[in-house]
Image: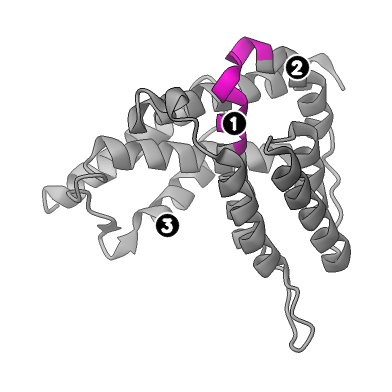
Amino acid sequence: MNANLATLADSRLREMLMLQEEVNNLINSCWRRAENPWYRAIWTECAELVDHVGWKWWKQQLPNIQQIELELVDIFHFGLSDLLQNHTIETILVQFQEVYRNFASQDNLKSIDSNIALEVVENFALDIIQTKKFDFGKFCELSKYLGMSEARLYQQYVSKNVLNKFRQDHGYKSGKYVKMWHGREDNDWLADISAVITKNPAIFSQELYLRLKEIYLEVINGK
């Protein structure tokens, strides 16, 4: 791996860890004391992931790539939270730097083989249930078998994280938040905006948030 790609991978991982800690603090400032069962949320997401890969032998099923990516991102949110539960961001970066760099270097991913993918998902879920801990390396392997590149994971993760924070900042918990913007869900707007913003770790999340806010203000002001 060349130095530029390694530096980029390090920056992306750092940003995602910082964003995860930020949104966890926003939801509950004492979230570490709560000791949430992150592992349970993860294996539950794995069950949903299996459905999107397709396991029903009595009918034709093709992997739903969009939903697979969303489930992987949800798993990663809970996984990072589990790591942050008892470790600092710097400790996590040191521990998993090489694993994540290796993941980032795998840019030629194969198409999904449903049989292999299902087995990998089930093994991942089994490990989570048995250990009650998120395995970073096994998650990277899972993503690889499901066709999710590091660049795609980063884009999707940051996008979903920013939307979660945006919702919390604008009354999601109290029920004041408006989810439909000019006849489209905020998720759809998010995808459109994310697709055209430069994925520079130094500015990506900030620009995405500001653009969401700009459109949202138009919605609530009736423009």
**Relative depth, front residue between 55 and 197:** 55
| Mark 1 → mark 3, Cα distance in angstroms | 29 Å
In this image, 178 relative to 120: left or right?
left
Q: Earlier in the sequence, mark 2 or mark 1?
A: 1
Residue identifier under label 1: 82
Tell me which secondary structure the magenta stretch mostly adopts: helix
| Mark 3 → mark 2, Cα distance in angstroms | 36 Å
- Tell me which amino acid carries mark 2: Gln
Q: Position of residue 151 (x, y in %)?
A: 68, 37
Answer with the quarter of the image where residue 133 lies.
top right
Quarter of the rendering occupied by the N terminus: top right
Q: Residue at x 60, y 54 (%)?
A: 45
Residue identifier under label 2: 95
Query: Which region is colored magenta?
Result: 79-91
For the image, the number of numbered tags is 3
| Residue 188 marker | 3
Q: Position of residue 190 (x, y in %)?
A: 43, 48
| Residue 28 marker | none
Q: Residue at x 62, y 42 (%)?
A: 39
Is residue 101 placed above or below 151 in the rendered structure?
A: above
Residue 86 located within the stretch drawn in magenta: yes
Q: Earlier in the sequence, mark 3 or mark 2?
A: 2
- Tell me which amino acid carries mark 1: Asp
Q: Position of residue 121 (x, y in %)?
A: 77, 55
